[in-house]
Amino acid sequence: MVVEQIGKNLKLSIIIPMYKVERYIAECLYSCLKQGVFYKDFEILCVDDGSPDKSVFIAKEFAKKYVNISIINQQNKGLSEARNTGLKAARGEYVWFVDSDDWIEPFCLDKILSDLCKYERLDVLQLQYRLTYEDGRKEEVPFWIIDKPTDGRTITKRGGLPAPAQFSIYRTAFLRDNNLYFYPGILHEDSEFKPRVCYLAASIMSVNYVCYNYLQRKGGSITSTYTLKRIKDVLTVNEHLLDFASLRVKEKACVKAFYRFIGMNMNSLLFWYRHYNKEDQKQIRKMLCANKKLFRCMMQTNNIKYQIEGFLFNISVPLGLKLHTLIR
């Protein structure tokens, strides 16, 4: 048992949602603990999202030994609600959403806490990350360095931040005060969350060292499955971003940036369309017709082909799909 006491003024809360991750959760927790940082300075909140396997048992064994680990139980509600539960319970000045099948770099937390202390009231600290594969391969994914506090509108105009929520650390009060929670019950929740966060942030910086290992599980990614829910949820994401851009975004350049992001999402839907069977394609056509206004955003991208497709789909979805199939 680690007898070190939790401090009253925690700098960081690490939020780890758990669902069917008994193979991975131990390594994730070990990585968060092997940091050379006093346990009194940060907490680890393991949110059990009604997991039916041994994930909770494993996390509880860790909690017996480490005073800064807490378990929060809830019925299965999905990743978004698990993260939201953790955010509401967090006591740290900052929060970091870490997926339970990923792990963080040894001793990166000391550097991160130092950077957070150096620059007061950063709303977002963007992290460098690498992709890791189950066969042992690793691939670093460089992100352009934001070497001084920069307002989110400037970052939005430059293309925004990478969508996965776990690649950033956020000031807790900033998220809560701006009602920046994850949209419940959908896939691609990060694509709805991160653009709003980026735009509203008063100050964003990035680190120049790798902090996060992002596991690419074979067959485990939502990007490798083609379901009707996936199409519906991306349309939901786009609708919410379009509403946000219309109601909250004031600068024309930022509005266009949101349109470009939505346009790229719509282009991805068109690419996925060919992977569905004919019956599913029929349902997708109905969904696309009901959301035809989203195709206008494709005309705001920097790709001439996408601009033409957006124009055609805005006229007629069936016509657009026929031409799309021919030119791809």
Image (cartoon, rainbow, N blue to C red):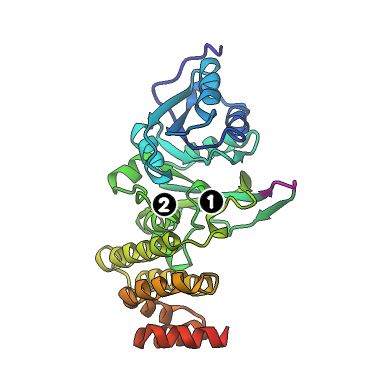
User: Is the residue 50 above or below the residue 169 in the image?
Assistant: above
Residue 73 spot, x, y in % from top left: 39, 29
Residue ranking furthest to the front: 279
Labelled pair 1, 2 in contact (Cβ < 8 Å): no
Observer-nearest residue: 129 or 192? 192
- Residue 206 is labelled as 1
Within 10 angstroms of label 1, few (less than 14), some, or many (20 or more) residues? many
Residue 42 spot, x, y in % from top left: 48, 28
- Please identify the quarter of the rendering in which residue 246 is found: bottom left
Q: Quadrant of the C terminus?
A: bottom right
Q: Which residue is mark 2?
A: 203
- In this image, 27 relative to 117: left or right? right
- Which residue is painted at 34% across and 77% down in the image? 289
User: Is the residue 328 above or below the residue 265 in the image?
Assistant: below
Q: Which residues are magenta?
A: 132-136
Task: Name the amino acid, label 1.
Answer: Ser
- Which residue is painted at 43% across and 38% down in the image? 95
Specify whether residue 133 is painted magenta: yes
Q: CA distance from mark 1 to mark 2?
A: 10 Å
